[in-house]
Image (tube, coloured by chain):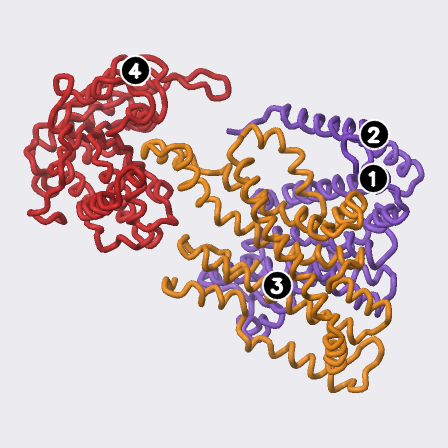
């Protein structure tokens, strides 16, 4: 394992080698060639580009992108803080884990999209609705993973902190928290795609500003080229965000023993 | 320390939570306009059971889930098998798939709506697209891993490729494949609900959104809680089935979340 | 095998040279430990009395189930005894005593894999001493175990034997009066084990630290120890104590082949068999 370039290694796993993209480009080229005019249902890639350009010129594309990305970033940041802290607290306390057990299990099994209508109804159409719902959904994988890792802290490390005569605070800061970091990051890795999906879902259901509502509007107006184009935009956003996360995770985990987390690719 | 005793603190906390919720709504402590009390939710639940709405919606959603899960499992599994066995495929085509994988399937809903309108096809297409990925990734990973490790074994035993596949690779990759199936089921459930919320006005997902639009909070919550229980139930059934059918592998695959 | 340059001196903890309580650094009187797994009472250690002399290398040997690890944890203050008294330098042991460090068998999980070797060694002293003193002690401890070149490596990059040496260095950085070692070389191959045995003997010689060393390897117990205690059980109790009057410094070839060594080995082996072990 190359020690010197964790960024490069992570980059390699976050973004696949380009030569494998040939089939995709071939497919797109074929599509373009077969149907240069464009049927209403299967517009060729060139039409997608035109549609997107139109949206960009009117400013709607970037406004929507801005809204979606802002919500996503804020939500992930909040979910990390809340999920990490609560996860640590719950993990440390066996009493808390037993008492909250059934509630946590239920919330873990609850399909995230269901929370969206609940949030809309209970909170109403307020500014912060989108952010609150996405945070509410994204916090779970982070909280549960962190709690589980904190709880599983080996008895041996507890004995080490005893024989090294570390106080409670030192044990927490030097042993408990660092050992939970890899699991915390696994939780964040799960939260990222979830947050993207739920952000889009909220936008689609409520027509609050964002890419989701933009796609729905284009679909209702039967601007199929725009819909396909926006699909590509969403794909790119998802690709970049996931890749960025893998790179960040790789850099943060460079001090830890190499794990399968890179190879799994989320 | 394993606690086999009934989780008394857990049950008590649950009851306390429900009681607090009931009290908060009854005494106007919590002032959300549309937050119903647990008692009202329970009544609404009884109503939708009696009227048969819950049953009809559940049947629709379950049917979609089963069809979607089986198809996604087969397609994802086959793709995973091919890519797991063929380094050539991985070198020249994997990146294309890796680019598609992070694409949130929900973004395909509008496309599917354009092509198929509000229909079961829309629901199934989007569900299957999304659910293929966990199955594909886990199967590919499992097979590739195993193929590398057991390559020498099959050479020594002079097995034909088919025998190698059936007797060595598939059983050894079974834990990974089971994990893939389990994740696939989870994704299928989530996507079914999403699709029913936006693309196909039938089933449990639609029932929730319908109750939202009609401003019937008690009914909405009743459906939401039922969906949660259903999700847990499905997962539980899968774990049981895995343990029965594949005693050794099933336990290993299902022991991790 | 001599990793320590002759001219290097490691400061000796003065307390280690001045024995307290008539030469005993540990005095255990009728110590018992009972546990209650699943509501059943299990007596792990039964009225065990043991003294550890200051500066000695005491080995404790016995088969599994005799309570060796538990005894070590009692001495280390990691768990309280159910009855009897354990006194370290005259005071009762409540919690981990200052001046005593435990070294565990599972080095991989006892080290902090996300910290560098140097920072692992500093774990017990950071925040308690000033920066310069911490750096000095870390360097000295690493030199004592021959890992000064690996200070900025991470444990997972090192072999098993090296990781165990990191753990030993971490303990040494505290300048302890007593090192309690729980089958520290059990997970290592024979050659690494031999090399580490000699290193531990050198540390003992250089620093005067008392050692309580648990092992199930009779050869190791005789090779290392001034005195070997044979534990029997369950419940754990002392079956026999053997004074080992082999000359120091010990040598892997000469000592192990000397007739006296073979006699001690046979004596202890017989005692272990007698005690019901294998």
Q: Which chain is orange?
A: A
| Callout 1: chain | B
SS for dot 2? helix
Q: Quadrant of the C terminus of chain C?
A: top left
Task: Please give left or right for residue A198 compared with residue A258 in the image.
Answer: right
Residue A175 in the image: x percent, y percent? Answer: 41, 41
Residue A129 in the image: x percent, y percent? Answer: 74, 50
Residue C77: give its label: none
Residue C139 in the image: x percent, y percent? Answer: 21, 48
Residue shown at the point (75%, 73%) measured from the top left: A228
How many numbered dots are placed on residues in this image? 4
Q: Nearer the viewer, mark 2 or mark 3?
A: 2
Q: Quadrant of residue A94?
A: top right
Tell me the residue that label 4 is attached to. Answer: C31
> Which color is chain C depicted in?
red
SS for dot 1? loop
Q: Nearer the viewer, mark 4 or mark 1?
A: 1
**Marks 4 and 2, how far apart in space?**
59 Å
| Mark before the other along the chain sequence, 2 or 1 | 1
Tell me the residue that label 2 is attached to. Answer: B39
Tell me the residue that label 1 is attached to. Answer: B33
SS for dot 4? strand
**Does any portion of residue C277 appear in the rendered image?**
no
Q: Which chain is purple?
A: B
């Amino acid at each position: 394992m190359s020690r010197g370039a964790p960024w490069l290694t992570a980059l390699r796993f976050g973004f696949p080698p380009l030569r494998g993209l040939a089939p995709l480009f071939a497919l797109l080229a074929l599509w373009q060639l077969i149907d240069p005019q464009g049927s209403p249902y299967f517009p060729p890639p060139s039409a997608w580009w035109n549609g997107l350009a139109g949206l960009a010129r009117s400013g709607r594309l970037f406004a929507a992108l801005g809204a979606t990305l802002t919500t996503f970033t804020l939500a992930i940041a909040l979910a990390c803080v809340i999920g990490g802290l609560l996860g640590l607290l719950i993990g440390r306390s066996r009493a808390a884990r037993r008492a909250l057990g059934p509630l946590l299990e239920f919330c873990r099994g609850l399909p995230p999209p269901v929370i969206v209508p609940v949030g809309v109804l209970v909170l109403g159409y307020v500014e912060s609705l989108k952010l609150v719902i996405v945070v509410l959904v994204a916090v779970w994988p982070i909280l549960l993973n962190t709690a589980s890792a904190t709880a599983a802290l080996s008895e041996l490390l507890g004995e080490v902190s005893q024989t090294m005569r570390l106080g409670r605070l030192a044990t927490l800061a030097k042993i408990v928290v660092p050992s939970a970091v890899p699991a915390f990051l696994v939780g964040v890795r799960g939260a990222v795609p979830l947050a993207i999906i739920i952000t889009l879902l909220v936008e689609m259901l409520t027509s609050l500003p964002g890419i989701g509502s933009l796609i729905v509007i284009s679909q209702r107006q039967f601007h199929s080229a725009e819909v396909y184009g926006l699909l590509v935009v969403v794909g790119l956003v998802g690709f970049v965000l996931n890749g960025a996360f893998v790179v960040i995770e790789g850099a943060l985990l460079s001090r830890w023993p190499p794990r399968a987390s890179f190879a799994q690719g989320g | 320390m394993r606690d086999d005793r009934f989780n008394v603190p857990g049950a008590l906390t649950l009851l306390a939570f429900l009681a607090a919720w009931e009290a908060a709504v009854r005494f106007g402590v919590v002032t959300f306009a549309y937050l119903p009390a647990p008692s009202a939710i329970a009544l609404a639940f009884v109503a939708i059971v009696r009227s048969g709405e819950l049953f009809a919606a559940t049947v629709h959603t379950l049917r979609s889930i089963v069809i979607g899960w089986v198809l996604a499992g087969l397609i994802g599994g086959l793709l995973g098998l091919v890519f797991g066995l063929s380094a050539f495929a991985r070198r020249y085509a994997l990146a294309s798939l890796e680019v598609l994988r992070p694409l949130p399937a929900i973004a395909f809903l509008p496309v599917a709506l354009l092509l198929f309108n509000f229909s079961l096809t829309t629901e199934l297409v989007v569900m299957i697209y999304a659910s293929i990925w966990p199955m594909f990734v886990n199967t590919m990973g499992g097979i590739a891993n195993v193929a590398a490790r057991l390559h020498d074994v099959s050479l020594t035993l002079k097995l034909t490729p088919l025998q190698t596949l059936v007797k060595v690779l598939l059983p050894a990759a079974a834990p990974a494949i089971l994990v893939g199936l389990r994740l696939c089921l989870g994704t299928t459930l989530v996507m079914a609900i999403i699709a029913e919320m936006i693309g196909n006005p039938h089933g449990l997902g639609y029932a929730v959104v319908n109750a939202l639009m009609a401003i019937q909070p008690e009914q909405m919550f009743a459906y939401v809680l039922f969906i949660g229980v259903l999700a847990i139930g499905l997962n539980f059934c899968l774990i049981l089935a895995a343990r029965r059918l594949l005693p050794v592998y099933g336990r290993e695959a299902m022991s991790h979340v | 095998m001599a990793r320590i340059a002759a001219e290097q001196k490691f400061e000796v903890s003065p307390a280690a040279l001045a024995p307290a309580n008539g030469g005993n650094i540990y005095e255990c009187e009728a110590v018992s430990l009972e546990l209650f797994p699943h509501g059943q009472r299990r007596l792990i250690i039964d009225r065990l009395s043991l003294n550890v002399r200051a500066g000695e290398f005491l080995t404790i040997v016995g088969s599994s189930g005799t309570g060796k690890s538990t005894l070590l944890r009692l001495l280390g203050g990691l768990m309280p005894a159910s009855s009897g008294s354990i006194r370290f330098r005259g005071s009762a042991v409540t919690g981990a005593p200052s001046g005593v460090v435990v070294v565990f068998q599972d080095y991989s999980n006892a080290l902090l894999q996300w910290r560098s070797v140097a920072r692992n060694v500093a774990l017990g002293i950071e925040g308690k001493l000033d920066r310069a003193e911490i750096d000095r002690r870390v360097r000295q401890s690493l030199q004592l175990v021959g890992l000064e070149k690996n200070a900025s490596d991470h444990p997972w990059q090192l072999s098993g034997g090296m990781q165990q040496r990191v753990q030993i260095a971490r303990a040494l950085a505290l300048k302890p009066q007593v090192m309690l070692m729980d089958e520290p070389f059990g997970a290592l191959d024979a050659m690494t084990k031999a090399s580490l045995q000699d290193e531990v003997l050198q540390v003992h010689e250089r620093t005067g630290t008392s050692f309580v060393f648990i092992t199930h390897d009779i050869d190791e117990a005789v090779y290392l120890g001034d005195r070997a205690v044979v534990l029997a059980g369950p419940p754990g109790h002392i079956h026999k104590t053997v004074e080992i009057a082999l000359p120091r410094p010990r040598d892997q070839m000469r000592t192990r082949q000397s007739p006296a060594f073979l006699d001690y080995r046979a004596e202890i082996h017989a005692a272990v068999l007698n005690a019901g072990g294998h």
